[in-house]
Image: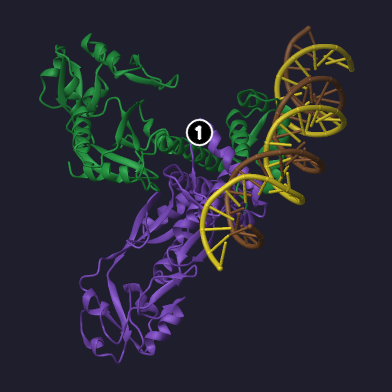
Chain colours: A purple, B green, C yellow, D brown
DNA sequence: GCACTGCAATACCCGGCAGGTATCACGGAG
DNA sequence: CTCCGTGATACCTGCCGGGTATTGCAGTGC
């Protein structure tokens, strides 16, 4: 019936994520009692119990899990509305809106493709200004959802295209990047199994948001670190073929025969109606 | 930065849709002055002018258009959060949530497919209860977006799958349904051009939400009316092949050679994580 | 030219509710 | 049994969301 207030959603997601009223209140910059009360009111308003209070902290009920998911989506939509409106209002030229589009790209994405896209679009008659926003590993989905970006280059199957409209731009195979002096570097082709258990070359693990997958390989934060570790003969990595563009002399690239192809998509929020965005997409699909 | 409050979005969308403060206030059940003030505050908060006040009513600026789009999406997300949470909280069995899924189907959809799907799913071990929600023409998208439904059967290319995850279920051709005693009923095949300008049989026009496309044909509100009008020799209609299931004796069906095939998809909100939903989709794709 | 009308903006007031502080209730650990 | 950590309750206060009355202003009809 009635839509939940943004404030209620903010409060609930904080509590649901912290599973602790005190910490959640701190995170929200408020005291604990009003937060407790607000959650109770929310539960009464919905006629549903969201939290299991078992006198030893709290846990989410089934309904609570649902609200956490849906609430995050709604909050993202609300912040996206604010951000995109602010961006659109920056400068209205007379007669037409001087739009600026924010394009999120993974740092490791194909430079070549991006360059071609930007050049081709800049040549369009009604080209808007494009701000390229480098984003961390798999962060583009989040950026599209909460309005920090208007459009993104994403890599299937690594990125999920769920909830966005998208067009395929480029399909490429994957390559293993290993030290030039490693025995396997002489091979003309490798399989995933080959590179996943080289005893002296564990696969590197990306660490993001402070968390990282467990494993034997070294933890890395950016592409330069990775390139260095490979050059030093300490690790091996798997990348789309376009990564050849940034290989060092100490690196060797070997195609992976059985790796799934990587498809670069251009993706945007499904409800988008911006003319500038439409132009960019048209340009992109014609590349 | 900060998410917009649901209330602000409600107010703004009302004003943006009515383009009249007085009517908008009435629709919102409040007085006009506080509404004016709220919009001004919103504009100050965003640092953007949303409305063009030209002393003769108001109109949207570019930023206003953006906010109308984004705000609608955010409002839908917020009401969806409320609805789905309420539904999930109805009855938590001990140990597992006794979920109920709401499936939106167009009234004219394939009964056969729906029946098979429901039967197959009911046979699953952990089947949730499925509530079938009949929805008007092309209304399923809206229902998925604002949480009235959890999953829907949609017909491409009539429904837009934008913003949802989906799986193809069934592809079928289209047929023209005409009076059995009409000359064209004897043909084994027809083209779209054939049926679109039969002098004595204008195509019927669906009227929904009080509005309807202009044209010569009779205005209809439901399928029974349509069936009757066809039987009376007053109109002709185009449907997917599965419509043969509800034909009357007075009807004749002729395949349309050049009509685009209709693809029935099962679609659901992209962020959905419900186990019950996953089970239903798994069942559906195996049909 | 002048009164009239329709619409948004301003001025001012009031009540409710969001948020704060102090305290309680309760269960676990020592 | 006491103390600590937790969430809930009690009570207060100030802000702000909303209401009524009024003004300002641009068309419009006479």
B152 lies left or right of B244: right
Viewer-nearest residue: B216 or A34: A34
Whether residue A130 is situated above or below residue A15 in the rendered picture: below
Q: Position of residue B161 (x, y in %)?
A: 35, 42
Whether residue B209 is situated above or below residue A159 in the rendered picture: above
Viewer-nearest residue: D29 or B89: B89
B86 lies left or right of C12: left
Q: Secondary structure at mark 1?
A: loop
Residue at image point 28% right, 72% down: A174
Q: Position of residue A239 (x, y in %)?
A: 33, 73
The residue that disc 1 covers is A47
Q: Position of residue D21 (x, y in %)?
A: 84, 20
Q: Is residue A126 visible?
A: no
Q: Position of residue B27 (x, y in %)?
A: 60, 24
- Quadrant into which the C terminus of chain A falls: bottom left
Q: How many marks?
A: 1
D20 lies left or right of B235: right
The subunit letter for the residue under badge 1 reads: A
Q: Is residue B109 visible?
A: yes
């Amino acid at each position: 019936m009635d839509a939940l207030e943004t404030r209620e959603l903010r409060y609930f997601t904080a509590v649901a994520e912290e599973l602790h009223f005190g910490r959640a209140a701190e995170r929200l910059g408020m005291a604990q009692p009003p937060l407790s009360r607000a959650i109770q009111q929310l539960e009464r308003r919905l006629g549903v119990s969201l939290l299991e209070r078992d006198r030893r902290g709290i846990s989410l009920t089934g309904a609570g899990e649902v609200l956490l998911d849906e609430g995050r989506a709604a909050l993202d939509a609300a912040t996206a509305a604010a951000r995109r409106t602010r961006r659109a209002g920056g400068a209205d030229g007379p007669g037409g809106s001087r739009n600026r589009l924010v394009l999120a790209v993974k740092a490791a994405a194909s430079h070549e493709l991006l360059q071609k896209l930007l050049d081709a679009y800049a040549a369009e008659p009604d080209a808007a200004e494009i701000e390229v926003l480098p984003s961390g590993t798999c962060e583009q989905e989040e950026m599209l959802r909460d309005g920090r970006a208007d459009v993104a280059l994403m890599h299937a199957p690594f990125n999920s295209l769920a909830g966005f409209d998208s067009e395929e731009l480029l399909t490429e195979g994957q390559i293993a990047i290993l030290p030039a002096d490693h025995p396997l570097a002489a091979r003309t082709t490798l399989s995933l199994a080959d590179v996943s258990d080289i005893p002296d070359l564990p696969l590197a693990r990306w660490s993001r948001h402070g968390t990282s997958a467990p494993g034997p390989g070294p933890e890395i934060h950016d592409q330069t670190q990775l390139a260095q570790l490979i050059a030093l003969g300490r690790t091996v990595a798997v990348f789309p073929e376009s990564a050849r563009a940034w290989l060092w002399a100490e690196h060797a690239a070997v195609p992976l025969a059985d790796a799934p192809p990587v498809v670069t998509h251009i993706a945007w929020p499904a409800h988008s109606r911006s003319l500038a965005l439409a132009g960019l997409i048209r340009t992109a699909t014609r590349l």
